[in-house]
Amino acid sequence: LVPGAMLAGWRIRVREERRSQETLRGRMTLVDDELSRARTIHDAMFPAAFEREIAFEYTYEPNHEIGGDYVHLHQCRASGAVTITLLDVAGHGLAAALTVNRLYGELERIFAEDAAATPQQVMGLLNRYIHLTMSRHSMFATGTCMRLDPTDGELRWVSAGHPPSLLRRADGSVQDLDTTTILLGALGSDEFESVEERLSLTPGDVVIAYTDGAFEARNAAREQFGIPRIRDLVGFDTPPRAWSRFIAGAVQDHHGGVADDDVLIATMTLRSLRIGGRP
């Protein structure tokens, strides 16, 4: 009787373990399906590539299924000016992605109410929103908002605690577009100074913005890719067909496919000027 009872008990445990494993696999499949659907919704917030007088393209490689880097594009119908807002939310994964979802909604609201909103206005309103709704949860963001007008080639930008964007002139020279204020959400509206800078661009000039995952990427020896290396790539003699893919490829080669953070690189290129307000 004893051996029989032991054998029966062993069979029961085996069946229970199999049921537990099947339940766990089912739950993992459900989670994977939910993340896949979440990724579809998350990706739908990103703009499509854009090519008129101003060309826009980007490359995004999240560290997880969804992440906290985001770029938003708006074109003013009246002037043709294109505004891109690139954001890097603190943290990674689902919490950061949910924050991106809320910031996307706020950006859509801002431009729906004022299609000609300047970078200074956009960043001031984003700072107010993050400070009032997210700072209590220690959720902040760095970001840069850049507006390029094809009627006169004027570039306006505000950079809030974000790595310097890079301006590559048509002659191959490279210029930093430095930070102009602190990160978003740290201060209330009364203390936040949304300082706006301006430059004139000519056809062939390209502006390149990126998140910290690009220059903080480490190789097997824990060496960072670094901003100087990005700057060197931007000064490359023969311009690539797509700057964002070119730089993202170099970053991926550096970290060997083992990234520590999301990587987002976006570009705006002034292809031509509008004459008399028309293409």
Image (spheres, rainbow, N blue to C red):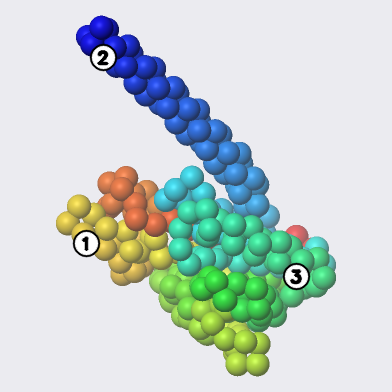
Residue of label 2: 6
Res. 184 image quadrant? bottom right
Q: Mark 3 points at which residue?
A: 110
Circles 1 and 3: CB atoms closer than 8 Å: no
Give residue 106's position: percent from left, percent from top.
71, 66
Marks 2/3: CA–CA distance? 70 Å
Name the residue nearer the viewer: 55 or 66: 66
Question: Residue type at mark 2?
Answer: Met
Say which element carries label 2.
helix
Question: Mark 1, residues whose alpha carbon is within 10 Å: few (<14), some, or many (≥20)?
Answer: few
- Give the mark, 2 or 3, whose residue is nearer the N terminus: 2
Q: Is residue 69 left or right of residue 153?
A: left
Q: What element carries label 1?
A: loop
**Can residue 195 be seen from the camera position used here?**
no
Question: In the rendered view of the protein, which quadrant contains the C terminus?
Answer: bottom right
Task: Inspect this view and state whether residue 259 appears.
Answer: yes
Distance from disc 1 to disc 3, alpha carbons, whole Å, reads 40 Å
Q: Which amino acid does label 3 sit on?
A: Ile
- Name the residue at 44% across, 48% down: 64
Instruction: Tell me, yes or no, whether the two marked residues, 2 and 3, touch with CB atoms within 8 Å.
Output: no
**Rendering coords of residue 122 (x, y %):** 68, 75
Residue at (75% x, 70% y) in the render:
110
